[in-house]
Amino acid sequence: MKTASIRDLKHDTTTVLGWVTAGERVEIQRRGKPVAMLSRPAGKGKPAKRPDFAARLRSIYGGTRMAVTAAELLSIERGDR
């Protein structure tokens, strides 16, 4: 079981919730004393897997690359070049 302070929960919520999503139980502490417990809801299966956007882009566009990068296009549009 992992532990996190209230400050961790406020400032690094994504990390703490990532632990919970991964199946960990997280004890929330205030001044070193436990005040709450976070865990996944009962009966829930594995967390939903994030889509593989890079694979999706490869399937659409293949391995082709643009001749000009987006940064270069912006520079041209702004008149920097």
Image (spheres, rainbow, N blue to C red):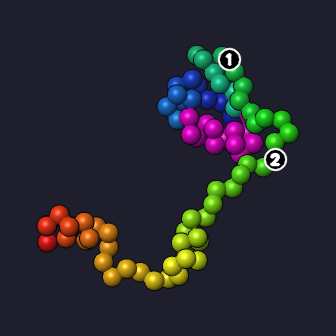
Q: Nearer the viewer, residue 53 or 78?
A: 78
Q: For the residue carrying disc 1, how many other residues have a C-alpha within 10 Å: few (<14), some (14-19), or many (20+)?
A: few
Residue drawn at (58%, 77%) of the image: 59
Q: Which mark is residue 35?
A: 1
Residue on which the image places disc 2:
45
Residue drawn at (52%, 28%) of the image: 10
Helix, strand or loop at disc 1? strand
Q: For the residue carrying disc 2, how many other residues have a C-alpha within 10 Å: few (<14), some (14-19), or many (20+)?
A: few
- Residue ranking furthest to the right: 43
Magenta region: which residues?
13-25
Answer left or right for 18 relative to 47: left
The image shows residue 31 at horizontal and vertical percentages of 58, 16
Image quadrant holding the C terminus, namely bottom left
Helix, strand or loop at disc 2? loop
Q: Is residue 70 above or below residue 48?
A: below
Q: Amino acid at mark 1?
A: Val
Quadrant of the rendered structure where residue 51 is? Answer: bottom right
Residue drawn at (41%, 81%) of the image: 65
Q: Nearer the viewer, residue 33 or 35?
A: 35
Image quadrant holding the N terminus, namely top right
Residue drawn at (33%, 82%) of the image: 67
Main secondary structure type of the part rendered in magenta: helix
Q: Is residue 18 above or below residue 39?
A: below
The image shows residue 79 at horizontal and vertical percentages of 13, 67
Query: Pointers 1 and 2 in contact (CB under 8 A)?
Result: no
Of mark 1 and mark 2, the one earlier in the sequence is 1
Q: Amino acid at mark 2?
A: Gly
CA separation in Å, label 1 and label 2: 27 Å
Q: Is residue 62 magenta?
A: no
Q: Is residue 17 magenta?
A: yes
Q: Nearer the viewer, mark 1 or mark 2?
A: 2
The image shows residue 75 at horizontal and vertical percentages of 20, 67
